[in-house]
Amino acid sequence: MPTFRQKVEAQVPALRRYARALTRDRDNADDLVQDTLVRALRSEHLFQGDDVRGWLYTILTNLNRNRLRSLARRPPLMPIEDNDAPDFAGPESGSRDISRALGQLANEQRETLLLVVLEGLSYREVATIQGVPIGTVMSRLARARQQIRAYLDGERPALRRVK
Amino acid sequence: MTTSDSPVQEDELHAFVDGELPPERREFVAAWLTANPEQAVLVAGWQAQAEAIRVRYGSVSDEPVPAKLKLEALLRGERNGRWRWLAGAAAAALVAFFVGGAAGWMAASAAAPASSGSLTADALEAHRLYVVEMRHPVEVPGSERAHMTQWLSKRLGYQQRIPDLQTLGLTLVGGRLLPGPSGAAAFYMYEGRGGERFTLYCAKAMKPDSAPRFKVGANYAAYTWIDGKAAYVLSGPDDRDRLKQVSEAVYDQVNKPPANM
């Protein structure tokens, strides 16, 4: 029976993957994972149940929201460079596009899409992590996919499809 | 696009792509798609998106985990009591730097230049900008410590404690007010007998708390930590032992009495 810490440790590679795609920046991503782990280890006594994985994704998702909120509080003239610019790691030509496309999404939509397609979580698990009903997960997913498609097709985001 | 009387709704198409349908329904939708090419194209597009995301980011989980994310290192940092912020995780970060290779921070900064949203990036930029300044490195000279404390406390909105690093051979050159990602930031400069300069960048923390990190740039290095509502970045020459010694002194002094604001 793996201990709590072993369960946490086993998730680190996946957390890094999720964080990298969420932030599209290696440094920010690993900082986020480090903060997540520190938080998790500190709150071990608060953890109940057995879904360590979902719990870690929840912490990371929330810490990233905090990070984005503080970025948004910056004075408007400050950001000269886009901190969320695509990172350097992608030599393959198509990869920049999907990275940029992710960058266009509202954060909640990006979370949903990544948790589902990259992390392979079920809609129900994602709903728990994001603290919303499954219906919201599905509509975020639909909007995310629609926007990515529009972006990759070079459409203007203003073209909205009415469902 | 599915219509409201279609036997398969768009929600189900997403569920189909994501493996959320029960097997018999899955077969039904698959068969329906062969008869509805327009929907099939839509679904194929979503599958291609998912594949592109997995191709782009899937391999991150195969990368070796950097030492700074090893639990032993983080736990060691947690257990070190008063000094846990710097000692433990700084060691871990150092190991990360040597073992994990410079890949992490240096590579990231090389390709994604100074992000002004990052407190550390702002601090390092300020360090780089002002340590070479001979005539006007600061706005307020170190001789006016009391005035500077009052001024910057007011501007930052919390009590400043400007560390005295004389015992380490560092004299306060002075300080200045800078724009930072979270609002005003205070920037203090110290100088050693050999002319080496250290700078301390203080700003309101944007995150609740964070383990300390050690970062290395081209000709300088920095410790950064967040403690309560304040974030600190101590930058100086790339001499880890010295930097750690100075960081410890700063840490002790800014945290000594309980914050009175």
Image: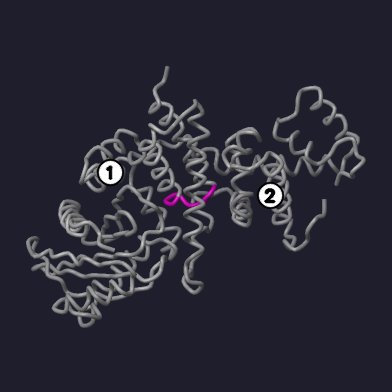
Q: For mark 2, does the 10 Å Cα neighbourhood hold few (<14), some (14 to 19), or many (20 or more) residues?
A: many
Where is residue B144? Give x, y as percent. 16, 79
Residue highlighted by disc 2: A144
Residue toward you, B109 or B88: B88
- What range of the chain is rendered magenta? A22-28
Between marks 1 and 2, how big is the CA–CA gap? 38 Å
Q: Is residue B26 left or right of residue A9?
A: right
The reply to whether the magenta stretch includes residue B250 is no
Mark 2 falls within which chain?
A
Classify B175 as above or below B256.
below
In the foreground, B195 or B70: B70
Q: Amino acid at mark 2?
A: Ala
Picture quadrant where residue A147 is located: bottom right
Determine which quarter of the picture holds residue B128: bottom left
Name the residue type under label 1.
Ala
Return the residue found at the far bottom.
Answer: B135
Pointer 1 chain: B
Give above or below for B152 relative to B210: below
Q: Is A27 colored magenta in this rendering?
A: yes
Question: Which residue has dot 1 on it?
Answer: B89
